[in-house]
Amino acid sequence: MPTAITYDLRKHVWLHAERVSNVSSTNFPGHYPEEDHSWVVSPSQDHIEGRQKIIKTAPVEFDLVGVDASIANAYRRILIAEDKVYVWDNTSVVVDEVLAQRIGLVPLNVKMIKPTDRNTLVFRLQVACQRRKHAPKDTTDPSKLYINHEVLSSHFRRVPQGEQEVVVADNPPAPTNLDIVLTKLQPGQEIDMELHAVKGVGKDHAKFCPVATASYRLLPLVILNPDKLVPRELADFFQKCFSPGVVQVDPRTKAVSVDSKKMQKEMMSREVYRHPEFEGCIRLVRVRDHFLFNIESEGFYPPQRLLPEAITVMRAKIATSTCCGNFTK
């Protein structure tokens, strides 16, 4: 028998037919009148939980449980919150500044974190366009007429610095996509640049942001009223008011139950509220401290590593704040 779910004023946001109630938390999240909820690290760690669900190249999905919305949103904002180019020769139609901007948007598969003399990355981009000597006379295809008519990210040539040849031998830095078109050339045009890759953060420029999307939603809950059951003759119709798999109907007794393992699939359309015959049989809520996160990576960070990086950034912010310095202990 599934465990009965009851409405909790502290944890649940109540979804009505045309409005939402109990949406505000207390002034101090987790604190309630006449109760001692002094915030220290060890007790808080007991009720904060992370559940990783799906790991792909992109995206990653996980649950963040037991924190206030302010904390979850801080992580989201950190997740979505400069390369230097030295031009020796550029006779293409694209001006230096625009070409440098395009180059800066090329993501690199770099696992290095701290900018030191051992991980400063240098690339050389040296491309010249020439006519093919034996190109077909009746063709207009530039790829058959010219050599290097397109400047691609695959033209990056790494220039190892210091001990990089040994340190990154197993995974040499390179563009994650080798087919990015940077510009196009005509015969006689040439590009010669030296590229210095540096680490930055998304708030400085969008090109530093490794996150394509970062979003979360509150866990949906469907609560059945044990005092007013769904009419058996309407059980199948009731089931269709929800996302597939969320509501189960016993084929023999027509008893209605909710599958808690598939609750996350419910999209909370509130279709059930349109039918007066189900009034009082159901309550739709969302859990205030259970966040369903979805993070998609388009940079060199694997998606499962992005949240730990965001936590590191938040800890650094707290450590530099005078009023909150004790939280890091």
Image (cartoon, grey):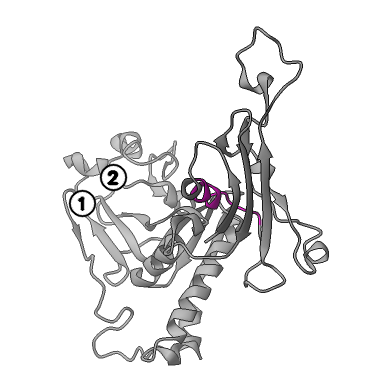
Q: Which mark is residue 230?
A: 2
What x and y, as percent, mark residue 129? 66, 32
User: In this picture, which residue range is highlighted in magenta?
Assistant: 99-109
Residue 104 within the magenta-colored segment of the rendering = yes
Q: Specify whether residue 164 is in view.
A: yes
Tell me which residue sits at (20%, 53%) in the image: 16
Q: Which label sits in the foreground, 2 or 1? A: 1
- Classed neighbour count for the residue bearing mark 2: other residues with Cα under 10 Å, few (<14), some (14–19), many (≥20): many
Residue furthest top in the image: 138
The residue indicated by pointer 1 is: 280
What x and y, as percent, mark residue 187? 63, 28
What x and y, as percent, mark residue 190? 63, 38
- Classed neighbour count for the residue bearing mark 1: other residues with Cα under 10 Å, few (<14), some (14–19), many (≥20): some
Tell me which residue sits at (40%, 48%) in the image: 257
Q: How many marks?
A: 2
- First in sequence: mark 2 or mark 1? 2
Q: In the displayed structure, does residue 111 sit left or right of residue 161?
A: left
What x and y, as percent, mark residue 25? 26, 73
Residue 237 found in image quarter? top left
Q: In the displayed structure, does residue 245 sit left or right of residue 189?
A: left
Which amino acid, mark 1? Gly
Q: In the displayed structure, does residue 53 sit left or right of residue 64?
A: right
